Amino acid sequence: MEANPQIPGKEQIVAVQKNDDGDIIAFKTESGRELDYLTALDEAKAGKLAHIDVFHKYGRDIIRSEPDGIKENNLDQMPEF
């Protein structure tokens, strides 16, 4: 089974950008679009990003990978751009 199967109408995140503290601040999609955190959050809430969950923690909304048990597709494990 493929680690990240294609989902029609949804883009996958393929790379992330981190700040000096190691926090993710931007995302790159398979089509090459670069999304800042707030834009990615809006798109995730609208269901436009595959394999991404939004949850509320620390008093704000947070983007995270779906908990599917596959370490390689976790946002923290993705290549940086």
Image (cartoon, rainbow, N blue to C red):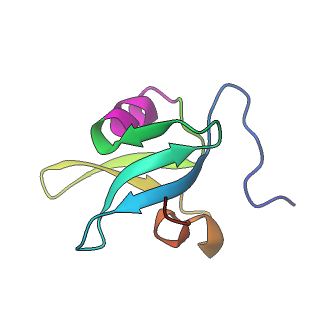
Whether residue 14 appears in magenta in the rendering, the answer is no
Q: Position of residue 73 (x, y in %)?
A: 61, 64
**Which residue is more in the foreground, 48 or 29?**
29
**Residue 11 percent location from the top left of the image:** 62, 36
Residue 44 placement: quadrant: top left
- Asked if residue 78 is positioned above or below residue 43 in the image, the reply reads below
Residue at the extreme right: 1
Snapshot quadrant of residue 7: top right
All told, the count of numbered labels is 0
Q: Residue furthest left?
A: 59
Residue 43 seen: yes
Q: Is residue 52 above or below residue 18?
A: above
* Left or right of residue 28: residue 45: left
Height in image: 64 above or below 44?
A: below
Position of 60 relative to 3 (above/below): above
In the picture provided, is 1 more to the left or to the right than 19?
Answer: right
Please tell me which residue lies in front, 19 or 38.
Answer: 19
Image location (x, y in percent) of residue 58: 15, 58
**Quadrant, the N terminus:** bottom right
The residue lying at 76 percent from left, 61 percent from top is 3
Question: In the picture provided, is 78 more to the left or to the right than 64?
Answer: right
Query: Residue at 35% of width from left, 30% of height from top?
Result: 42
Whether 44 is among the magenta residues is: yes
Q: Main secondary structure of the magenta part?
A: helix
Can residue 69 be seen here? The reply is no
Q: What segment is highlighted magenta in the picture? A: 39-47
Residue at image coords 32%, 44%: 37
